[in-house]
Amino acid sequence: MKPTAIIFSGIPCMGKSTVRSRFVETLDDPFVFSTDDYIDEMAMQLDTTYDAIFWDTIKEATKHMRGLLSEAIEQKRDLLYDQTTPTMKVRKGIVHRLTMAG
């Protein structure tokens, strides 16, 4: 069966992650691409807040998630992509990668 990809994009506090959590239950072991989750984890490890480290870690989080995205595509896993307001260029790039992967 062909993997499913769902992309959530929008402004902060819009409810993307809340809606995403409902989709996680409907897919077979989906890969969840979320820079917010990565930054939250880093904040906990550093005993600080998401807001305090966001600008210092967003590029690292995005790079890390893109590497994991490549793995998810190779493994043909279902995918939930949740990122706060990526640019149209970024969204097109992700859609293109997913389309090329089949």
Image (cartoon, rainbow, N blue to C red):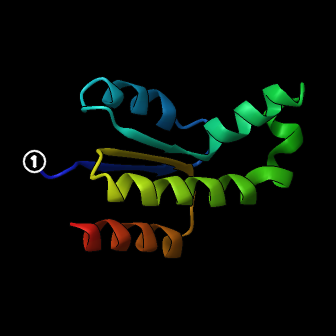
Horizontal placement of 21 versus 63: left or right?
left
Horizontal placement of 38 versus 23: left or right?
right
Q: Nearer the viewer, residue 86 or 53?
A: 53
Name the amino acid type tagged 1.
Met
Horizontal placement of 65 versus 29: left or right?
right
Q: Residue at x 71, y 32 (%)?
A: 40
Image quadrant of residue 102?
A: bottom left
Q: Nearer the viewer, residue 84 or 35?
A: 35
Q: Residue at x 80, y 25 (%)?
A: 44
* On screen, residue 77 above or below 87: above
* On screen, residue 87 above or below 4: below
Image quadrant of residue 20?
A: top left
**Badge 1 density bin: few <14, some 14–19, many ≥20, Cα 10 Å:** few
Horizontal placement of 28 versus 54: left or right?
left
Q: Which residue is mark 1?
A: 1
Image quadrant of residue 49?
A: top right
Q: Residue at x 61, y 35 (%)?
A: 13
Q: Residue at x 10, y 47 (%)?
A: 1
